[in-house]
Every structure is written in structure tokens, then in C-alpha cells.
Amino acid sequence: MPDGGSVETLSEVGQPLASSVAGSVDDIRVVVASSTDDLMRCMVVRGAVWLGEDEAKDHTPYSALFDANDISGSTHLLVYVGDEPAGTMRMRWHPGFVRFERLAVRTRFRSFRLFRRLARFAFDLAAARGFRHANALARLGTEKQWQFLGARAVGPLMKFHGEQAYPMVFDLPGAPHPALVDGLAGAGRLEFEEAMGCSDMKLMGAA
């Protein structure tokens, strides 16, 4: 399942959310899923998009959408528009880089602004943890959205789960949490150990 397929074209840059959506871009907020209820919202959104839409049904098997990585080793992001769960993305942490996966945005909430808000939150979170690089697969036709946010294609178009996609790499621009700047060299310092116990939201300076 190539990621990045659930956004609209670059023509929407600077445009408000679809007129059918109550509220504005200021109503968009991204959080780290931190409870069972949050995780359920992520799974419902993903299922609604990838299993509930004809295009997804034609290309993507269930086994490619939900796997054991949803339970362990992943961070799930949840996007709200107002109080409504609108989108989700999974982040998996690997040595030296983070992988962006399972991007899904409900049809009526799709806009480049929402995608940009979600992606930049993911960039900032990964950078706060000390990561400098990220990777994703962009479905054919969505690579420009990723490139607009700083990604670059690192290989030719490839076939993955029945779809054409570009492998993308990002150099993350953000700064790590001050206590994590030195990496493992900071181990044993009080600030480092306290940072290790922080939630992702607190690492980013949020409540």
C-alpha cells in the first residue's frame, strides 16, 4: 500500500478545507495516539479510507493495511478537524531513520493544508527524538506533494501492492530535544534520563 495517496493536488495549496467541512484550517490539530480510544480512531479512519473506497478495494488487500506493527514499535498520529477524527499516519522507528506509513485521510477532509500539517508534525516529532532522516512511499501522482515538503525521490517508480510508487527520503529540518542533542553521549545525565521518560508530545514542547 503506497502511502501519500490520500491528499489532493498542489492546486489546493493556500486554499481552505472543502466547503463541506465545517470550520477552517485553524481547526486542524495533530496528536500522538496515546490511548486505546485514540488507536481505535486511527484504525477506523484507515479502514474507512483504504477498505471503504473503491480505489482502495481494487488494489489493497486487508493484510497490507493492518499488521503486527500496529501494536508494537509504532507511533500513530491522529488528525482532528474540530472534534472529528479526519486522518491518521503511522511512524515506525528504525536505526537512523523513521518510516512514514499508512497515511489515510477521510474524503471530505482532504486538503493539502491538512496533509502538510500532519507531515510537519511527523517531521518535528522525529527530529525531537533525534532522527535526521525519514522514508516513505509516495503513490504515483502524489510525489509532488511530498517533494513540496522537502522529500526527494531516491529510486525509479516501483510496483508495490499492485500500485506504482516512488521511494522518497526526507532530511528532517527540525532540532532534537535539548537533552537528546548529544545522543547516547548524554546517557546518565539527569536531563537525558528525564527526557527518556517524556511522552512524545512533551518532547515536542506540547502539554
Image: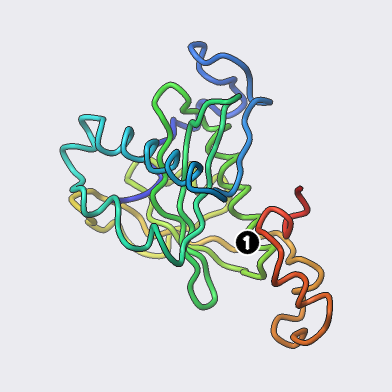
Percent position of residue 15, x then y: 59, 21
Foreground of the two, 125 or 162: 125
What colour scheme was applied to this rendering of the protein?
rainbow
Q: Is residue 153 above or below residue 79?
A: below
**Residue receiving disc 1:** 172
Q: Give the residue furthest to the front.
A: 36
Q: Is residue 128 above or below residue 96?
A: above
Q: As drawn, is 192 to the left or to the right of 93? A: right
Foreground of the two, 179 or 4: 179
Q: Residue at x 37, y 62 (%)?
A: 69
Percent position of residue 70, x then y: 39, 57
- Where, by quadrant of the figure, is residue 22 drawn? top right
Within-10-Å neighbours for mark 1: few <14, some 14–19, many 20+: many
Q: Is residue 197 above or below residue 18?
A: below
Instruction: Count all numbered tags in the image, as a single digit.
Output: 1
Percent position of residue 88, x then y: 47, 42
Q: Residue at x 46, y 56 (%)?
A: 100
Q: As drawn, is 201 to the left or to the right of 165? A: right
Percent position of residue 95, x then y: 51, 78
Q: Residue at x 70, y 69 (%)?
A: 197
Q: Amino acid at mark 1?
A: Leu
- Where, by quadrant of the figure, is residue 4 drawn? top left
Q: Residue at x 75, y 88 (%)?
A: 185
Q: As drawn, is 203 to the left or to the right of 83? A: right
- Where, by quadrant of the figure, is residue 159 drawn? bottom left
Q: Secondary structure at mark 1?
A: loop
